[in-house]
Amino acid sequence: MHHRAYSHAARLIIGLSVVPILIDY
């Protein structure tokens, strides 16, 4: 049931984690 929510949350976390790296470069 929470598979979809967990996947969406993980995607947002990964995206927010990648953004600072791209800005740093």
Image (cartoon, rainbow, N blue to C red):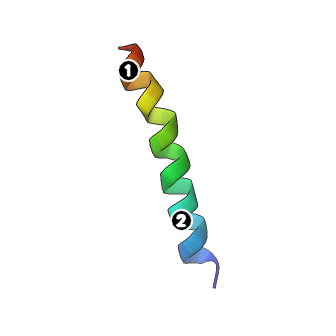
| Circle 2: element type | helix
The residue wearing badge 2 is: 7
- In the image, residue 12 lies at what x, y percent? 50, 52
| Circle 1: element type | helix
Does residue 22 appear to the left or right of 16 in the view shown? Answer: left
Instruction: Tell me if residue 2 comes above or below residue 6 in the rendering.
Output: below
Quarter of the figure with the C terminus: top left
The residue lying furthest to the top in this view is 25
Q: Residue at x 63, y 85 (%)?
A: 1
Instruction: Tell me if residue 25 comes above or below residue 7 in the rendering.
Output: above
Disc 1 marks a residue whose amino acid type is Ile
Q: Residues within 10 Å of mark 2 (few under 14, many from 20)?
A: few
The residue wearing badge 1 is: 23
Disc 2 marks a residue whose amino acid type is Ser
Instruction: Tell me if residue 2 comes above or below residue 24 in the rendering.
Output: below
Q: Which is in the foreground here, disc 2 or disc 1? A: 1
The residue lying furthest to the right in this view is 2
Does residue 12 appear to the left or right of 22 in the view shown? Answer: right
Q: Residues within 10 Å of mark 1 (few under 14, many from 20)?
A: few
Q: Residue at x 44, y 34 (%)?
A: 18
Q: CA distance from mark 2 to mark 1?
A: 25 Å
- In the image, residue 3 lies at what x, y percent? 59, 75
Q: Residue at x 58, y 72 (%)?
A: 5
Does residue 15 appear to the left or right of 2 in the view shown? Answer: left
Q: Earlier in the sequence, mark 2 or mark 1?
A: 2
